[in-house]
Each structure stands twice: as C-alpha cells, then as structure tokens.
Amino acid sequence: MGYVLLAGSMLFGLAVATGAHAADVNKLAESCANCHGKDGANAESDVPNIGGLSVKYFAITMEHYKKKERPCVETKIRSGDKKGTKSDMCQVVKDLSDDDIKQVAQHFAGKKFVRTAQKFDAALAAKGKGIHDKSCEKCHSEAASLADDDAGILAGQKTHYLKEQTEFFLAGKRPMHKKMEPKLKALSKDEVEAVLHYYASLQ
C-alpha cells in the first residue's frame, strides 16, 4: 500500500511538474512570438523566421547573444503588453538559464520554417545559385534548406536580415565558422548580393 501511495505521489508530482514546465516554456515562447510571430514566423523584414531551426543552432545563437558575441540590434517589440517599447536580443536572453534556452529551442524546432515571399532579381538569383553550389552547398546543403546542418536555414529567410548578418560576419562582429570565413571573404560584394537574391528566390 505504501509503495502504491508513493508511486501515486511521484506520478502526481511528475504531472504537476510537467504541467508547470510546459506552462513556463509556453510563456517564454509567447514572449518570443511578440516579435518573431506565432510559431516563429512573421511578416517583418528585419525579424528572422525562427520556426524549424535546429535545437543546436538555436541554442548556439542564444548563447552568442547572451555573451554579447554578436550585435544586439535594437528594435521595437511588435506585439503584446510591451508593444512599441525598445529592446534587443541581449536583453531578451540575459536572464535565461541553459535549460530555458534548451526548452525554447526544442519548442521552435518542432515548428515549420516558413519561407518568406519577397522580391528578387531572377538573373541575380541564377548567378547566386552557381556561387552557392560552388562555395556554400557543402555546409548549407539542399539549397540551404536543411535544419539538420545546424547552420541555420537560409532558403527563404528575410533578405534584409541575411544582408545585415553577412555584413556583421565580414566586419568581424559575429563569430564565423573557420570553414566559412575564407569562402565568404573571397566573394565580391556583387557575388554576395547575387547569393542573397538566390536565397530570396527560394519561396
């Protein structure tokens, strides 16, 4: 009887803890959604879509922000109780624990990455495809569309955001993988622009 009561108590405690944990994750995800949109998809040109990114990539990105190893661009919160107030990613993640980050990463990894419908130049996109296939495909495989590469999803990501981040890479303001650095720095400004048009064309 004692074992039954103990087991029942443990199961009840687990259920309560699991319910509370789910509520915490949902609250954190809701905070993210105030800028990134429900399920990590939004219509803002300067805010990346984050649904469907791998857990590893998402977590590393949050750690970079937490350690201020990449620029935290100030922006306005787009919805929710704090709509219109200014914030940045360093402020957003500064108080998150490693477990918080992991759980939020798992939450958004379970969502679908939504490609953005945006303008692009077809001729530049065709040129960009050739450059991608030669210089980028090895790490950003299947036309930069696989989350499992743990390198982000570039296909259909916001051009404004990708251009900004590329500039941060080239300026040494954001950590860059050692294999990526020589390849990116070898590209001309026009070639980078062409690659961005290629990613924009993947809708």
Image (tube, grey):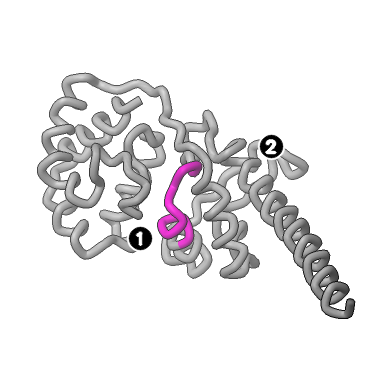
Of residues 37 and 39, the one nearer the viewer is 39
Residue 79 numbered mark, or none: 2
Residue 136, given in percent of the width and then of the height, sits at 19, 46
* 104, 200: nearer the viewer: 104
Residue count near mark 2 (Cα–Cα under 10 Å), binned few <14, some 14–19, many ≥20 = some
- Residue at 50% from the left image edge and 42% from the top image edge: 51
Is 56 in the magenta?
yes
- Dot 1 falls on a residue whose secondary structure is loop
Indicate the position of residue 33 as horizontal and vertical percent values.
63, 42
Instruction: Determine the residue positioned at 71% across, 54% down.
Output: 22
Q: Nearer the viewer, residue 93 or 53?
A: 53
Label 1 crowd (10 A; few <14 / some 14-19 / many >=20) = some
Whole-number angstrom distance, CA of label 2 to CA of label 1: 29 Å
Q: Position of residue 165 (x, y in %)?
A: 36, 48
Q: Which residue appears at 32% of the width and 29% of the height?
A: 200
Disc 2 residue type (three-letter): Ser
Residue at the disc numbered 1: 173
Q: Is residue 24 left or right of residue 73?
A: right
- Judged left or right of residue 67, residue 38 is right
Q: Is residue 125 above or below residue 85?
A: above
Please state if 17 lies on the left or on the right of 38 as rendered: right
In percent of the image, x 77 and y 59: which residue is there?
Answer: 20
150 over 197 or under it: above or below:
below
Q: Position of residue 135 (x, y in %)?
A: 13, 46
Q: Earlier in the sequence, mark 2 or mark 1?
A: 2
Disc 1 marks which amino acid?
Answer: Lys
Q: Secondary structure at mark 2?
A: loop
Q: Is residue 27 magenta?
A: no
Which stretch is magenta?
A: 50-59
Image side of residue 144 versus residue 17, left or right: left
Name the quadrant of the C terminus: top left
